Image: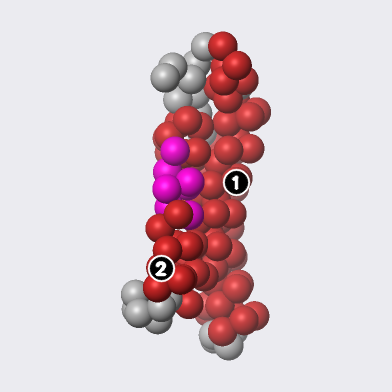
């Protein structure tokens, strides 16, 4: 099926493509929380949810990459997911809030912004 013609052509608008990247980022972040809940692939309901999330995530990125720069998309997707997962880890899993950890999370945020402003 060809998505760049007919009723799916709107997916290739750069503004829509960025929305797809944001949705993929949210799915990626949620997937990582699901992965943590899977207890090393021992909790099958969590595993199944995780597999389904990955099967949603990758096609969204693939469609978005048709019209967006790969470096900017990858920096946003991975960087934003990493920061969100670090924050979720702090809030929900009691992970460290040391000065240096928060400092370097901030550096990642600055990097995401920098790559997207200069790309």
**Vertical placement of 73 versus 89: above or below?**
above
**Vertical placement of 12 versus 41: above or below?**
above
Say which of marks 2 and 1 sits in front.
2
Give whichever of 57, 18 is nearer the camera: 57
Is residue 99 at least partly visible in the picture?
Answer: no
Q: Image quarter for residue 40?
A: bottom left
State the image coordinates of residue 79 (x, y, percent, origin top left).
Answer: 50, 55
Which residue carries the number 1 mark? 23
**In magenta stretch: residue 54:** yes
Q: Is mark 2 on a helix, strand or loop?
A: helix
**Vertical placement of 21 versus 91: above or below?**
above
State the image coordinates of residue 19 (x, y, percent, origin top left).
Answer: 63, 37
Which residue carries the number 2 mark? 47
Please tell me which residue is depicted at 41% across the width and 78% down the height of the picture: 43
Please tell me which residue is depicted at 45% across the width and 54% down the height of the picture: 52
Give whichever of 85, 54 is nearer the camera: 54
Of all residues, the one furthest to the top in this rendering is 6
The majority secondary structure of the magenta stretch comes to helix
Q: Is mark 1 on a helix, strand or loop?
A: helix
State the image coordinates of residue 76 (x, y, percent, origin top left).
Answer: 53, 47
- How far apart marks 2 and 1 lie (CA) works out to 20 Å
Of all residues, the one furthest to the front in this rendering is 45
In the image, the segment drawn in magenta is 53-59
């Amino acid at each position: 099926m060809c998505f760049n013609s007919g009723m799916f052509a709107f997916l290739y608008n750069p503004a829509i493509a960025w929305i797809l990247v944001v949705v993929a980022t949210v799915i990626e972040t949620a997937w990582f929380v699901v992965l943590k809940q899977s207890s090393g692939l021992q909790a099958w309901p969590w595993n199944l949810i995780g597999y389904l999330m990955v099967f949603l995530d990758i096609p969204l990125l693939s469609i978005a990459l048709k019209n967006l720069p790969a470096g900017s998309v990858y920096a946003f997707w991975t960087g934003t997911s990493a920061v969100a997962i670090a924050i979720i880890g702090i809030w929900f899993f009691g992970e460290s809030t040391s000065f240096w950890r928060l400092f370097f999370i901030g550096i990642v945020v600055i990097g995401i912004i920098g790559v997207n402003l200069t790309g």
